[in-house]
Image: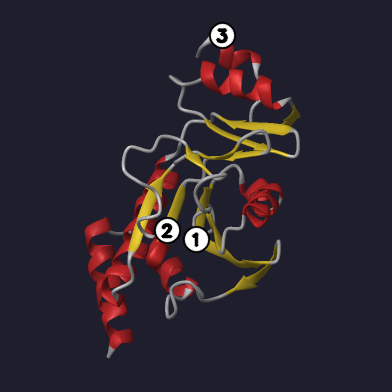
Amino acid sequence: MSETQTQLPTDTWIYTSWQEYEQIVANLLNEKAKSYYYKGHMRLEMAPVSFDHGQDHVVIIFAVTLFAALKGILATGLDTTTFRKTGVQDCQPDVAYYLRERAQAIPAGTGIVNLDRYPAPDLVIEIAKTSLLDDLGTKRSLYEELGVTEYWVVDVQNAEIIAYAIADQGSKRIQESQLLPGLAMSILEEALRRSREMSQSEVGTWLLSQFQQKQE
């Protein structure tokens, strides 16, 4: 663990100027850290990523991409990408998607996604093992203000998904995606549960059969 890492509080929001935040993040480029900035406060998440977290991360990305492909919905998924409104907000969600006409909104070669220039992602997903309450609270407010259309929190401990539709800087719980009509959270939760007992390829085969049934 580096000296920089040991000096910084993690998994909590601390008051920091944007200039200080930028410097801290620049110094952490070689660390496996996720960073957030919202309302004059920063949060660093540097806890080791667990097996369950990593597994759910892969299952969710596969499920969303497979569903979009079968439905003919253009989709571009991003893994732990930085989205930034300079001086105001910064975030690194576990998963983000641009859909339909915005699937190609971010050009190849882009580093940090500048939200003063490009749109916010349509769908943001956080995989929560140790950060559940923050993902449901402060981060949800952050994504409401960024203008994300839909926000899902995967509760790794309970294999559950808490999903929200966002509009007018507010959010409401949903049981089925509005961005991906026909994709029920219950199906994704069952896929997560199955992934605890079988390989991901077997889970993929099961998901494919479920999605194809819905097309019939």
Is 3 left or right of 109, judged from the image as shown? right
At label 3, the amino acid type is: Glu
Q: Where is residue 79 in the image (x, y as percent from the top left)?
A: 40, 45
- Could you classify mark 2 by the number of other residues whose Cα lies within 10 Å: few (under 14), some (14-19), or many (20 or more)? many
Among numbered discs 3 and 2, the one appearing first in the sequence: 3
Among numbered discs 1 and 3, the one appearing first in the sequence: 3
Q: Which of 50 and 183 is in front in this view?
A: 183
Q: How far apart are marks 3 and 2 (CA)?
A: 37 Å
The secondary structure type at the circle numbered 3 is helix
Q: Which residue is drawn at 59% across and 42% down?
A: 130
Q: Do the residues labelled 3 and 2 touch (CB within 8 Å)?
A: no
Q: Where is residue 2 in the image (x, y as percent from the top left)?
A: 51, 11
Q: Are marks 2 and 1 in contact (CB under 8 Å)?
A: yes
Residue 122: numbered disc: 1
At label 2, the amino acid type is: Tyr
119 vs 117: above or below: below
Q: Which of 107 and 21 is in front in this view?
A: 107
